[in-house]
Image: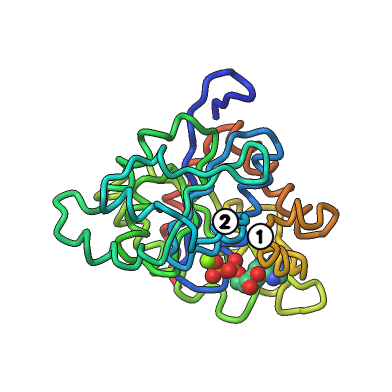
Amino acid sequence: MKTSKNTGFRMGKIIAIANQKGGVGKTTTAINLAASLAVLEYKTLLIDADPQANSTSGVGIDPKNVRASLYDCLVNETRAKDLILETEVPNLWLMPSHLDLVGAEIELINHPNRERIMKGVFEEIKDDYDYLIVDCSPSLGLVTVNALTAADAVLVPVQCEYFALEGLGKLLNTIKIVQNRLNNDLDIDGILLTMYDTRLRLSNQVATEVKRHFDELVYETIIHRNTKLGEAPSAGKPAILYDADSSGSINYMNLAREMVQKHDNTWVKSADKILDFEE
Ligand SMILES: Nc1ncnc2c1ncn2[C@@H]1O[C@H](COP(=O)(O)OP(=O)(O)O)[C@@H](O)[C@H]1O
Ligand SMILES: [Mg+2]
């Protein structure tokens, strides 16, 4: 990947973090991966595409005070540049969300290009950043399809819990449809194991099973269960500002390093392999 950091030429890479299951660590990953990339001096934009706006509040911005959000870009043609906010972390910016975004699903339904609106919004700003990290909502509705259509790659967090693989087939099918009809270039960045608990045999079993199915697509970095990751959002901070020495903060720094390294090598063409998966 060419970035401002190593070549002086910026080519933003859009990574959507998606899994229609709730509570698997999408938002925690979006916030902390974005903050870690920023700490590594990659200019990063965190895009909150979930009406619950947890990524927005998680970097210290109260959604109630947001004047314009992604919703306004999608529905009211507000320019993306006009709503991007600075965060406390150097190199990290936020495109905020708002509860309004729920309405976008219905308001856009008759739009002639309804799946590609977000792509148009991001195109204007994409190359101002090295990484654009999109926190998707727990749904495979129109807003998430827009995110997948706009993205270069999708990162799938999988919680090390019972039924970890449940629903994954549906997500992969949606990805396949988007690849075929809307975004031929969409790649699968990888699968990320989250909330791993070393004390539980189950965590280990799930990790083994996920690796057996998806092989080298699974990130070597595993995100362990760590209470600081749960506490940090209530302080409106990524873990690296809340407690830099916590295992959560260290895990996400390692994830960012692994991601950058992977992109600096070749962009692994992995989609065919993963899409053969059957639940
Ligand atoms: N590695 C972790 N260790 C401890 N708590 C976590 C971890 N990852 C996420 N959580 C907590 O689990 C809950 C769900 O995580 P979240 O990132 O919001 O999932 P999603 O966005 O997929 O719904 C949140 O309360 C979050 O703080
Ligand atoms: Mg979330």
Outermost residue to the top: 8
Q: In this view, does 11 lie to the left or right of 91?
A: left
Secondary structure at badge 2 equals: loop
Question: Who is closer to the viewer here, 167 or 109?
Answer: 109
The label number, if any, that marks residue 175 in the structure image: none
Task: Identify the residue position indicated by label 2 in the image.
Answer: 61
Disc 1 within 8 angstroms of ligand 1 (CB): no
Residue under the image location 41 percent in, 62 percent down:
172
Asked if residue 58 shows in the view, the reply is yes
Task: Indicate the position of residue 70 as horizontal and vertical percent values.
Answer: 39, 52
Q: Do the residues labelled 2 and 1 touch (CB within 8 Å)?
A: yes
Q: Is residue 198 left or right of residue 48?
A: right
Task: Indicate the position of residue 67 as horizontal and vertical percent values.
Answer: 42, 53
Question: Who is closer to the viewer here, 162 or 242?
Answer: 242
Specify the amino acid type for callout 2. Answer: Ile
Residue under the image location 49 percent in, 58 percent down:
65
Q: In this view, does 144 lie to the left or right of 28?
A: left
Question: Who is closer to the viewer here, 279 or 18?
Answer: 18
Quadrant for the C terminus, please: bottom left
Specify the amino acid type for callout 1. Answer: Gly
Residue under the image location 24 percent in, 50 percent down:
181
Task: Indicate the position of residue 26 as horizontal and vertical percent values.
Answer: 55, 62
Quadrant where ligand 1 appears: bottom right
Task: Identify the residue position indicated by label 1 in the image.
Answer: 236
Q: Distance between the residues labelled 2 and 1?
A: 7 Å
Residue under the image location 48 percent in, 30 percent down:
128
Question: Who is closer to the viewer here, 262 or 275?
Answer: 262
